[in-house]
Image (tube, helix red, strand yellow):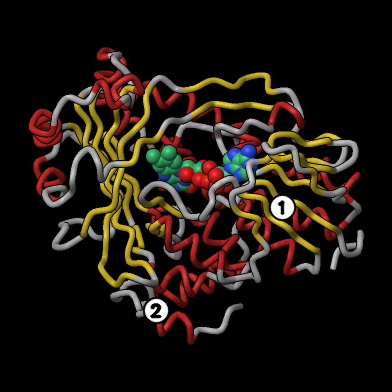
Amino acid sequence: MSTAGRLDIAIVGYGTGGQAAAVFLSRDGHNVQVFERAPSPRPIGAGFLLQPTGLEALWSLGLLERALAYGAPVERLYGETIGGRPVMDMRYRELDPRLFGLGLQRGTLFSLLDRAWTPAVQAGCSVAAVDTDRGTLTDARGRRYGPFDLVVVADGAASQLRGQVAPAHLDRPYPWGAQWCLVEAGAWAWPAELRQRYRQARAMAGMLPVGTHPDDPTPRASFFWSVPTAELEPSAWCGEPAWRAGLDAVWPEAAQALGATCVPEGLAAARYRDAVHSRWHAGRAVLLGDAAHAMSPQLGQGVNMALLDARALRDALREAPPAQALPRYVQRRRAHVRAYQAWSRWLTPLFQSERDLVAHVRDWGFHPLTRIPGLRNQSLRVLTGTRYGWFGALQPDAAFLEALDAARTRGQGWRPARSAAALAETPPG
Ligand SMILES: Cc1cc2nc3c(=O)[nH]c(=O)nc-3n(C[C@H](O)[C@H](O)[C@H](O)COP(=O)(O)OP(=O)(O)OC[C@H]3O[C@@H](n4cnc5c(N)ncnc54)[C@H](O)[C@@H]3O)c2cc1C
């Protein structure tokens, strides 16, 4: 229980950030109520890479074992040109032999977090306004909720509420987005690697093994295909033969893995934003997850950041009442987030743009540069999410590292995922 006692807390949005905040805060004894726009809350998109940072947040919720039971351990981050020239080649173990990433289906994390508390979710409720002084919410139909002691605004990258909490000094869409979907992993040749293939910066395909889902034992991989946002409009659809031929020219193995996928119906469209706030809180309201710091997924950190935000908010509320806890939470998270937002902003045009010269320099310079010993360590830290600020490092908890090491020794996460029945038998925490 926090020093502030039991608080009435509203959370807007039941994505990863809202879910994680709900679990962390309800477990501390707070009275948590979630407001979610979707009539039936569910994850959108395919899969993602959990970094050691995000795994540590799950560990602190007692959910590491469950995540490992379903996810696909990822040892290596590898990207190459269509000619086979390596552009990125990093292994977690170079940083620490105990570390690895975990590919996870969105639905799996959704389900793990949803089962980790007694959900109190008002679904189909689109929040239109937040009164930061009173701690009240108003939905799109004019209904009022509250007052709450604290309102956590976690309504995602395209947040309509962030400006009501604090003005953004940057909030703009990226000109490129993606199509993505889950495919059967089948005999995919690289089951422990995030792999990408590039043709200049104009085309990028990615495949990430993401394991299974509690309700579906089929191992899957998450496919990613970079697209200018204008081409995500249905009116710009190039037709299935041209689309498949485009992918085949970049990565025949991925095109083959996509064979059974209906396109474009089976592909989800993703658009990203870049949003920077100098303040994340006002009165009784605070921003969390993409609502606080939307960024391009180039470095694959957003889910991890949302989990870390939720844990940091929980920790700050354990130490002090909201008026003092909110600035502490922001202060602890901002240095981590700011550096990643800047790196994502700089790196994205190297991978998603029409800048051929920039891509050429990337193809020739990136890999050799990241082989220089000092720079290699820096790049490893950035890619694994463990850089803190420009020069610092997040130090994982020793007990968490032991838990990871023990899982590896036991072969946990390296064997086929367990059934839903086995999950139900695993006690939380
Ligand atoms: C293609 C792609 C690949 C990615 N890959 C990775 C990766 O590998 N690793 C990684 O860590 N991150 C990755 N990310 C980033 C990650 O998906 C996001 O950072 C993360 O999902 C943010 O979580 P969130 O809870 O802040 O927002 P969201 O997950 O967007 O959740 C917001 C929720 O708020 C709800 N909502 C919105 N408005 C309202 C309203 N007015 N009232 C009520 N509810 C509302 C929405 O319906 C939604 O449920 C990727 C993103 C993309 C697009």
Please, what is the three-letter code of the amino acid marked with disc 1?
A: Ala
Give the camera-side residue of 344 and 115: 115
Vertical side of 141 occupied by 208: above or below:
below
Counting other residues with Cα less than 10 Å from the Cα at mark 2, is it few (<14), some (14-19), or many (20 or more)?
Answer: some
Counting other residues with Cα less than 10 Å from the Cα at mark 1, is it few (<14), some (14-19), or many (20 or more)?
Answer: many
In which image quadrant can residue 62 be found? bottom right
Where disc 2 sits, the SS reads: helix
Q: Residue at x 35, y 52 (%)?
A: 91
Residue 159 lies, in percent from the top left, at 61, 33
Please, what is the three-letter code of the amino acid marked with disc 2?
A: Ala
Q: Residue at x 32, y 29 (%)?
A: 366
Which comes before the other along the chain, label 1 or label 2?
Answer: 1
Give the camera-side residue of 303 and 409: 303
Residue denoted by label 1: 312
Give the camera-side residue of 408 and 258: 258
* The C terminus sits in image quarter: bottom right
Work out how far the residue at label 1 is from the one at label 2, CA to CA, in angstroms.
31 Å
Q: Residue furthest bottom?
A: 425
Residue 139 lies, in percent from the top left, at 70, 40
